[in-house]
Amino acid sequence: MEKAILGTKLGMSQIFMEDGSVVPVTVIAAGPCVVVQKKTVETDGYASVQLGFGAVREKSVNKPEKGHFAKADVALKKYLREFRLENADQMNVGDEIKADVFAEGDRVDVVGISKGKGFQGSIKRWGQHRGPMAHGSGYHRGSGSMGACSTPSKVRKGKHLPGHMGAERVTVQNLGVVKIDLENNLLCVKGAIPGAKGSLVMIKNTVKA
C-alpha cells in the first residue's frame, strides 16, 4: 500500500539500538493530516488525494481557499500538497492521516526545500578549484576561463558561474524509519533530510523498494 504524509523537520538526534549501535536520526513532526480533496480518473483523468497540514490563522487564508476548505467541511490548514497514490480511491475527504500510517523498518523518500545560501561564488557553489594564492598571481577565486574564443564566440549554456545557491526542492531517497512515537506523532528517520528546522517536508514510500 502506498503511503504519504506531511510534516515539519524538528532537528537531528541519535538513537541507541538494542545491539548497542548508535543511529543518527532526523525527528519529524508528521501529521496529523486531513484529506481535503480527492481526485478520480473519471473526473480529473488521474487518481490522487490532497492533504492539508498545519494550523493557520483565519485571516491568513484568502476567500477562495476558505471556500475550498468549506466544501470539504474541514478546518483551515496552512499547507496543501497532492499525492498520486494507487490506493487513493480507498480514501475519503475528511479522513485523518497520522504517523501510524508508517511502521518501523519502512523505507521512505523525503522531499523538502534545501537551506538557502544566498549569492555564492563558483568555488562554494560548484566546488571549483582556486588559483595560486601567491602575491604574483592575479587570479584567486574567480570563475576562470569562459570557454572557446572565435567558435562559438559565446559562453555555452550551463557554464558553472556564481549565482543563487540553495532554496531548491531536494529529494532524499530510501531512508529507513527507525522509530515512531504515536503519542506525539513523531517519525525518526535515519540520516539527514533537506531543509531548515521547522520547514515543511513530504514523506512517502520510496520508489527504490
Image: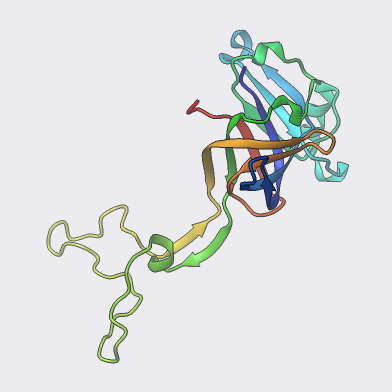
- Residue 198 vertical placement versus 160 (above, below): above
- Residue 5 vertical placement versus 137 (above, below): above
147 and 173: which is toward the camera: 173
- Residue 124 vertical placement versus 20 (above, below): below
Instruction: Specify the quadrant of the image occupied by residue 179.
Output: top right
Q: Residue at x 67, y 31 (%)?
A: 104
Q: Residue 184 at x, y = what percent? A: 83, 39
User: Residue farthest to the top?
Assistant: 42
Q: Residue 98 at x, y = what percent? A: 77, 29
Q: Residue at x 32, y 84 (%)?
A: 133
Q: Residue at x 86, y 23 (%)?
A: 73
Instruction: Specify the quadrant of the image occupied by residue 68.
Output: top right
Q: How is the image coloured?
A: rainbow
Q: Residue 154 at x, y = what percent? A: 22, 60
User: Residue farthest to the left?
Assistant: 150
15 and 145: which is toward the camera: 15
Q: Residue 53 at x, y = what percent? A: 76, 36
Q: Quadrant of the N terminus?
A: top right
- Residue 23 vertical placement versus 104 (above, below): below
